[in-house]
Image (cartoon, rainbow, N blue to C red):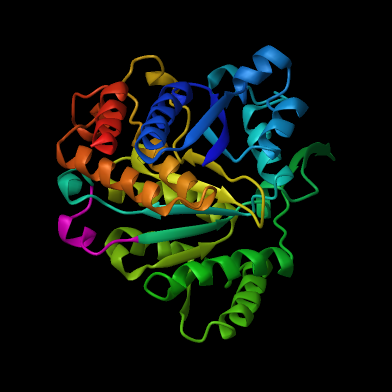
Amino acid sequence: MNARIVVLPGDGIGPEVTAEGVRVLEAVAQRFGHRFTFEPRDFGGASIDRNGVPLTDETLKACGSASAILLGAVGGPRWDAVEASVRPEQGLLKLRKQLGLFANLRPIRPYRALDERAPVKASLLQGVDIMVVRELTGGLYFGQPRFTRQEGGVLHAVDTLEYTDAEIRRVSELAFRLAGARRRKVTVVDKANVLETSRLWRKVTGEVGRAFPDITLEYMLVDSASMRLISGPSVFDVLLTENMFGDILTDEASVLCGSLGMVPSASIGSSGPGLYEPIHGSAPDIAGKAIADPIGSILSTALLLRHSLGLEAEAAAVEAAVQRAVEAHCWTPDLGGTASTGDVGARVAEYIGQ
């Protein structure tokens, strides 16, 4: 297979972890006889510094015509001023919206070798295999109106939480299809006792669920779900939720894996290229120290191979190589190890080659 992959290293540790993702994809190409070409582009804060905007029209066009997109991370203190009108995160939101990437998949799979590194009892981690499906282009992050203004001597800030039935339906259908190939259970997480949007989520997901009679559908309020993710995470199979709740809950769920640096994600739409990135941020405090955990980025390449390129055997090979590296205690300092970012990437690539 020939594939063109746009690489958006971004900011902070982004360039370091994406370099290891590319290294692993090169190892996959060599072992399985594919040809992957990589096209690096400025993005986020790096693009603001060079181009004045976090996402240029040229980069957006290149992403739209690519086979897939591999992203590092965006943001940092240099661009975080409250009064800033241009922010790195604006580029990420625009990219998701323009490419129609409405669903974010975040798998949570702990490794037994890391049981002692997770801040929950090892017994609670047995049988945990969660696929979080987060709606990605609606909700508070995109709703209008959005403003801060002075009225009668009082400063008001407004963000709008809005969803349509069509937005909910398309991501729900994807979640049910994924559940059909897993343990056949969908848990919708919302705040239906307070929010009109959550009540719409319940109505639409109930309608979708009737078309999948073999899938168990349950509802859980977000505060209860956040507790159950720590006290009994094995009850979840596919966890379906709106944009902001999914953003928060998956950071919480990452501790089940031992570190935020271990969790990958795939942002996909109905067609076109997907966007693949670890769920962590740019971690500017450790940028350039070669200690960032690249596993989230490497596992994101497995999702890229599976969902954008349709290469299941290759994706499984990456995941198996990561499993071996973890079991060999090839750990970066966030997991209590001494391996460098490059050490981990090299070890995973070596195992793929074998």
Asked if residue 127 is among those painted magenta in the image, a careful observer would answer yes
- Residue at x-position 17% and y-position 49%: 115
Quadrant of residue 22 in the image? top left
- Left or right, residue 227 beside residue 242: left
Q: Can residue 73 be seen in the rendering of this structure?
A: no
**Where residue 294 sits: x, y (%)?**
36, 31
**Where residue 14 sits: x, y (%)?**
47, 26
**Where residue 119 sits: x, y (%)?**
23, 47
- Residue at x-position 24% and y-position 45%: 323
Quadrant housing the C terminus: top left
Residue that protrudes farthest toward the right in the picture: 152
**Where residue 109 sits: x, y (%)?**
31, 54
Q: Can residue 145 be seen in the rendering of this structure?
A: yes
Asked if residue 265 is among those painted magenta in the image, a careful observer would answer no
- Left or right, residue 247 beside residue 57: left
Magenta residues, as a range?
119-129
Image: 69 above or below 202 = above
Depth order, front residue of 224/117: 117
- Residue at x-position 40% and y-position 19%: 285
- Left or right, residue 183 beside residue 60: left
Image: 206 above or below 275 = below
- Left or right, residue 38 beside residue 255: right
Depth order, front residue of 227/246: 246
Count of number-bearing discs: 0
Q: Main secondary structure of the magenta part?
A: loop
Image: 95 above or below 37 = below
Image: 182 above or below 152 = below
- Residue at x-position 73% and y-position 43%: 98
Residue that protrudes farthest toward the front in the picture: 33
Depth order, front residue of 128/203: 128
